[in-house]
Amino acid sequence: MSATHQQSQHPDLEAFADGWKGATGFACGFANKQQQFFRWPDQRPQLEAWVCAQNNRQSAYVGWCLFSEPSRAADRASVLPGILIDLDLASGNHAKKNYAPSATDALVVLRQTALPEPSRIISSGGGLYLHYLFDEPLILAEQADRARAAAVTEGVTAIIRNALRTQGWALDNVSDLARITRPVGSRNWKYDDLRVVELVSETQERLTVADYEMLIGAGAHRRTAERTSATSAVEVERKGGEFALIEKHCGFVRRLAETPQDVSEPEWYAVATLAAHCEDGEDGFHRLSALDSARYREDDTAAKLRHARKVKPRTCFDIETSLGSSACTRCPFKAADMVSPYKLAFGDNKLLELQAQYVLSAQTDSYHPVSGDMPALPAISFNNHFAHRLERIHSLFIHDARSPKVIGTDYVAGDQRLIIQRPDGTAVLNEWRPGGLEARDGSTEVIDEHFALLLPKHQERDWVLDYLAHLLQHPAVKIKHAIMLIGEPGVGKSFINDLLTGLFGEQNVKVDDAAIHASDYKRALGNKQVLIIEEMATSSKWEVTNALKPWFTSEKVVANEKYIRAHEVRSPRGIFIHTNHAVPAVFEPGERRNAVFRIDAPARDQAYYDRLFRMGAQQFSAFKARLLQRDISEWSPNARPPVTEAKTEIIEASRTPVAADIQELLRTDRIRKDLVTVQEAVALLAHPLSSAGGPSSSKVTKGLQELGARKLQKTKLSNGSTVDLWAVRNTQRWLSATHAERKAHYEGVVGPSGIVLGLVEETARLQNV
């Protein structure tokens, strides 16, 4: 018989004896839905014999608690040794599959919480048993004791459940006082192969019930945070450190000084775990606690610190997941190599001031201000700008673990996180900033009146309002076309700029009034929610229009920035173009990147605009509320924008001379059929008195393409010749037509003179003039 099999025949109850510590009561043995009770410790040998006998043929369990009488009812539990966590793993035989993949994965996540290392870690064969033992068992003499025990057990369970949930893993409800567990050395009969319950690790870590009550705080009322990469639990670096640095640079701790009356007891205790390990922590924590004069008691505060010295400093992960700290959402130190705010206590104050304000992007080797109100600084500029504070500041920054560093930047509108962790473990700086006026109900009469003035057609006005509503309701979704407003100066287009700034916040709106869109350095146009182009550059219209195409339709574009490497940015979610020019851009037929609206209304008197900019601005919040409530279920950000008269005029004006001439032939029915050859079009375009012979075949080919004509397969005519036909009308029909259909349509009806009527007849007539 193997050693492992021998071990499986001798379940060990020493773990239970160690937890109960001489307490008396009834111990419960459980197997195959049957339970039996034994007086503890008098009948320990009988319980051991019973467990061994059951273990030879089926799984045997022992109750976690002792009971006041032979009943496993929760209200009969009399001795609680600590908190038992039964943690299933995906490798086990379970109905659910969304458990932690392995014991290592689960323990890495749990070590980021405020909980101490489990007193025992036991492998059950399909998961883990975690024993968080009290320094002394909790005697449950009264109902209040059982309520306290249940609360502590549920609270610790909630911390673990929420930590696992950040990774998408489950923890079943295992917090009742009637819980049973497998003894070490017993066999897990749930599996066909031999699996023995084994002790993985054991420590002498024991906390009091009061310590756990400090740790758990609000128990199950915890929110789940984002998925984060696994890191080990924080260790106390060395004795000392300045709590004043934590207080200054940690947003969670800083909140205590700003609004002490709103800080919960669990939050106070979390800060105590940071202060307790710092040289100036005791004085600092008393000073902060005293700010809440209504609740401050010197002896209570001292007790918190005594308890806090027994545990490790609270981790950032736990502060965010267990306590739901909103300050963590926009903390730049989430991009630093630090597990706990405690690490700030050992930083350099001058360097920490910059670390709290700037994030270094490896993609561009530049420093991005957390505030977002200034452009990024190249490393050399950062060095020079702050040289008066510290020498070699860039070198100090890149070598300090507290420095926020990201692989690059992104712009995820609507996502409150400053630092976004990618699935691959890298982090990016989110350049979107919460902004814009708060929505609230109210009148929008003045704004409605102005929109009716600019866009009197209901269909066009509703489309623009849907566009605005989509930007607000789906801030991260790219709208793949722009709004172009064409109108004379002074009609009130600039009011739209003010409105957009009020809706989305100045930091999320870029107004290009310096023709940046026509320059080589377009980085400033990216990573914005809304781009407003004040006037399209009219020189080199074709080049400018083509250069802007990816900004209108692509999710991301590569952009240049002076003195910084070219890098990828997210294109604006919506684009508005204001122009005074009738033809501000070059549009190809079928253009789908712009919705063009011409403003024909004349400028109003000054009193109108005084009222508009004064009262209209006061209605921005109400207008925002209305847009957020607007039904846009039928509107799509990917659909083709409306083809307005203004857009059609730009398309017509954008055509090359040859394309315009071919369009005129079609309009006047000089090309009467749907199919034509390039040579015939050349002949039709040749002036009868000119010896030049008309435009070249290549120019005519480009003109046909510009008009959306499509070249068809070769067609063999009745006279034996083969021609390349182009469909200039009803394109889709002719792309799917048969050879016979193309031939019949092109040859048409033969006239009395023997010349084919239609296009060929017109060509022959012109050639004989």
Image (tube, helix red, strand yellow):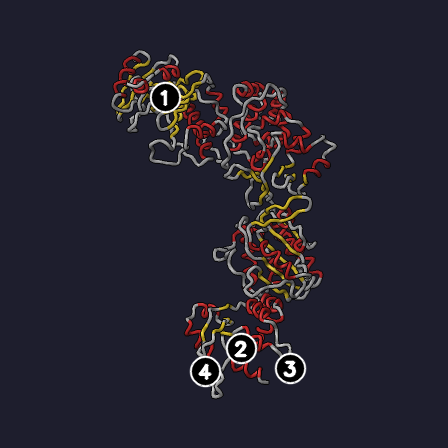
Badge 3, how many Cα within 10 Å: few under 14, some, many 20+?
few
Q: Give me the disc on residue 671.
A: 2
Residue at screen point 63% across, 64% down: 599
For marks 4 and 3 on the same chain, the one whose residue lies earlier in the sequence:
3
- Kindly state the secondary structure of the residue where label 4 is placed: loop
In front: mark 3 or mark 1?
A: 3
Location of the N terminus by quadrant is: top left
Q: Which residue is mark 3?
A: 689
Residue flagged by tag 2: what amino acid is it?
Ile
Residue at screen point 60% across, 71% down: 696
> How far separated are the C-alphas under marks 4 and 3?
30 Å
Residue flagged by tag 1: what amino acid is it?
Glu
Q: Which residue is mark 4?
A: 749
In front: mark 4 or mark 1?
A: 4
> How far separated are the C-alphas under marks 2 and 3?
20 Å
195 relative position to 247: left or right = left
- Kindly state the secondary structure of the residue where label 2 is placed: loop
- Kindly state the secondary structure of the residue where label 3 is placed: loop
> How far separated are the C-alphas under marks 2 and 1?
90 Å
> How far separated are the C-alphas under marks 4 and 1?
96 Å
For marks 4 and 2 on the same chain, the one whose residue lies earlier in the sequence:
2
Q: Position of residue 47 (x, y in %)?
A: 29, 16
Splitting the image into 4 quarters, where does residue 457 fall? bottom right
Between 289 and 528, the one nearer to me in the picture? 528
Q: Which residue is mark 1?
A: 198
